[in-house]
Image: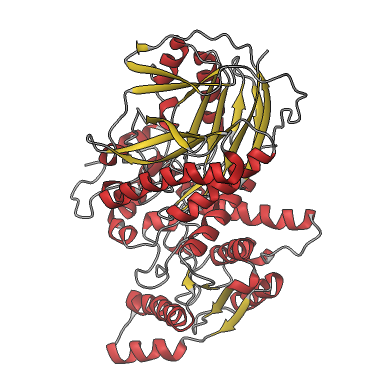
Amino acid sequence: MPQIRIALAQVNATVGDLDGNASLIVDWTRRAAEARAQLVVLPEMVLTGYPVEDLALRESFAAASVQRLAGLAGRLDEAGCGEVACYVSYLDRDEVGPRDAVAVLHRGEVVARQFKHHLPNYGVFDERRYFKPGQSLDILRVHGLEVGVVICEDIWQDGGPIAALGRAGVDLVVAPNASPYERSKDDVRLPLVAGRAREARAPLAYVNMVGGQDELVFDGDSIVVGADGTLLSRAPQFVEHLLLLDLDLPGGAARAEGRIGGFEVRRRVLSAEPLPAYAPAYPATIAEPLSDEAEVWSALVTCLRDYVHKNGFRSVVLGLSGGIDSAVCAALAVDALGPDAVYAVSMPSVYSSAHSRSDAADLAQRTGLHYSVQPIETMVAAFVDQLGLTGLAEENVQARCRGVTLMGLSNQHGHLVLATGNKTELAVGYSTIYGDAVGGFAPIKDVPKTLVWELARWRNAEADKRGEIPPIPESSITKPPSAELRPGQLDTDSLPDYTLLDRVVDDYVEGDRGYHDLIASGHDPELVERVLRMIDKAEYKRRQYPPGTKITWKAFGRDRRLPITNAWREGT
């Protein structure tokens, strides 16, 4: 049977860094060539990074992308990779408009180009705003095997290019992807890819981006499945990786071309003869999937690290209250950046408890981060006395004094400020705008409160397994949460129990369920009315909150877009 060694280069590209991404492509293709791979596939839009958003509409950026692609073909040839069929996705532009494209580079030339057909326009995707769809399919003969290609969303749509490739005849399908992470996505991804392989009647090699881009994070998890849908190989999650696999394929696929299933099928021969038989050196390897908690933690760490580094910051600063949210954020920051790049500040007021101060100091000692104490009592007094503030205004000015302190340290030392709020509190507006909501990035913005506790317990347990000091003090996990803005304050003074609250938030925000549907599903009517009122009133706060890592099906920001000025209320 004809043989081929394929390489899936699961890499971390940076949006807009055309030269850096081109060098990345050369480096990983060289590794594939050194491993004697005949075909290498890189993720969707690897040359430009993904998503490029409105950069796609800028003619100068598209022209630069096309120019770099042409230069890249020559660079690969000069680097000794000319005999490798290299699938590189990039931004193209023709007389129709911008295109999400993939090109095949071989022997110093661009030998084929294909445009993405299905353009997603849901959730975080706005591709119909940016791109024009393609209508052709390019099948290349590589060492006697017919190789088709589809781009990301093309495999998510029924009756699309995969079905056309199956009718035309292919021996292998490759699929560059930039598929953002969300919890349990592989429960959908792997069955989908397996089904498409069966539909094409050929193995399908799916390569995904890895790394963070603003609030999106890509988990890699590249896979190869057989024509019968069997998982053949899998790359690890959240790391760059070159997945190599030797395939013995039946060959002999039909070689139809022309108009098939609504697509114009074109064929080109790169190398007609099969390779001489060789002993396989890269058998199937299947990386073990991460547990749910490990997956989420890795996503948060990866996105935070890339946001900091790709935006040119060297360090972060955050308020450390001794509570669970700031403790988890600090632990994430240390894992992402190392303790020497993390600066934590305790900012006690007259209402701060002794255990909060000691828990903050304890976490600093456990993790080795930089730690300082900046009391805010005199700052608060200046505002309270001069403005005559009482009640909620006095509570909020404490949070705002803390925000000003962190921003001052940021300006002085160049730190990126981290906002430490979670998804539940952001949903119901349990934060102070221009106070604890200040910052450039919010690591746990899309993490429900109950999951914050789960992650803390998991991270400490992992430290125990490795014989390390658990980073999060036990008392930060077990004590009742409190903003400590007035004597004896607890979160439950203002909010329902977090377990109940998270269920309503999840059903209303992610499930888009209305008032009557929520009641019918078993939620308490009084609780539903109260929570929905808080969520609807807090839209203006969420609009001004920093970006943060998306881990759920529907995150605040890109995913959920509601008007601030909005008189509609559920249940009316």
Could you tell me which quadrant the N terminus lies in?
top right
Identify the residue at image location x=23%, y=50%: 563
Identify the residue at image location x=76%, y=30%: 281
Residue 58: tell me if it is visible.
no
Can you give x and y, in whole percent of width and height, for residue 310 in the image? 48, 61
In-image side of 226 versus 533 (left or right): right
In this rendering, the count of numbered labels is 0
- Pick the front one: 490 or 191: 191
Identify the residue at image location x=41%, y=89%: 379
From this view, report whether residue 222 is shown above or below residue 491. Answer: above
Can you give x and y, in whole percent of width and height, for residue 526 in the image? 36, 47
- Among all residues in the image, which is located at the extreme right? 467
Can you give x and y, in whole percent of width and height, for residue 220 in the image? 57, 41
- Pick the front one: 11 or 413: 11
In-image side of 413 versus 429 (left or right): right
- Pick the front one: 323 or 540: 540
The way the protein has been coloured in the rendering is secondary structure
- Pick the front one: 243 or 137: 137
From this view, report whether residue 512 is shown above or below residue 316. Answer: above
Residue 356: tell me if it is visible.
yes
Could you tell me which quadrant the C terminus lies in?
top left
Where is residue 264, by image quadrant? Answer: top left
Can you give x and y, in whole percent of width and height, for residue 210 in the image? 54, 46
From this view, report whether residue 248 is shown above or below residue 222. Answer: above
Where is residue 260, by image quadrant? Answer: top left
Identify the residue at image location x=28%, y=59%: 540
From this view, report whether residue 500 is shown above or below residue 408. Answer: above
